[in-house]
Image (cartoon, rainbow, N blue to C red):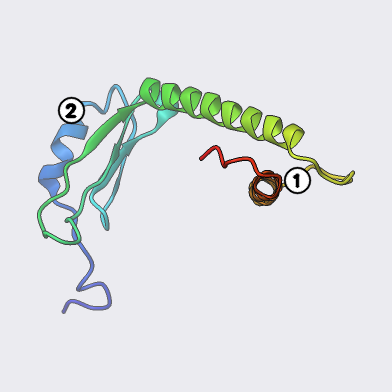
Amino acid sequence: MQGHFGDAPRINPGSWRITQTRRSEHRWSGDAASGVRTAHPAMGGQRRYGGGLHALTGKPRRRRIITVVQRQAANVRERRRMFSLNEAFDELRRKVPTFAYEKRLSRIDTLRLAIVYISFMTELLRQHGHSSPA
């Protein structure tokens, strides 16, 4: 009798061989549904992303192993990217004339206001007989 979990994915014991040889180095856990195994990062292990089958082709997905060091480096790059983006928005906020708001404009409001301002300035130049720079 299969019972309630008869259609649930089963863990392939062969997929655990790799992790069992590293048991002294890492604590591993497995996810039966997705086929994803992860090592706890605090233990200095690796994370595996992917597993399962590709949605369109039905072929097994290629697994990518990401180490803790790689993840930390990616986090640093992302923080730098966000810092640079925030600086660019702050500069744009300073360039676009606004009313004295109590709080700073959101990114989308800043972009919308910049579009309106550029359109206004373009129209102003056009009315005074200057050609458009674009």
Residue shown at 23% from the left, 78% from the top: 3
Instruction: Residue 82: give x, y in percent of width and height.
Output: 56, 31
* Whether residue 33 is situated above or below residue 27 in the rendered picture: below
Give the quarter of the figure containing the N terminus: bottom left
* Whether residue 7 is situated above or below residue 93 in the rendered picture: below
Mark 1: amino acid:
Leu
Instruction: Residue 90: give x, y in percent of width and height.
Output: 70, 32
The mark found on residue 105 in the picture is 1
Mark 2: amino acid:
Thr
Q: At numbered mark 1, what does the secondary structure look like: helix, strand or loop?
A: loop
* Whether residue 105 is situated above or below residue 45 in the rendered picture: below
Quadrant of residue 39 within the rendered picture: top left
Q: Return the residue nearer the eye: 22 or 48.
A: 48
Quadrant of residue 19 within the rendered picture: top left
Label total for image:
2
Q: Return the residue nearer the eye: 43 or 124.
A: 124
Residue bearing mark 2: 21
In the rendered view, does 52 fall on the left or right side of 127? left
Q: CA distance from mark 1 to mark 2?
A: 55 Å
Q: Residue furthest front?
A: 129
Instruction: Residue 70: give x, y in percent of width and height.
Output: 36, 23
Residue shown at 65% from the left, 35% from the top: 89
Q: At numbered mark 2, what does the secondary structure look like: helix, strand or loop?
A: helix
Residue shown at 65% from the left, 28% from the top: 87
Residue shown at 20% from the left, 63% from the top: 9
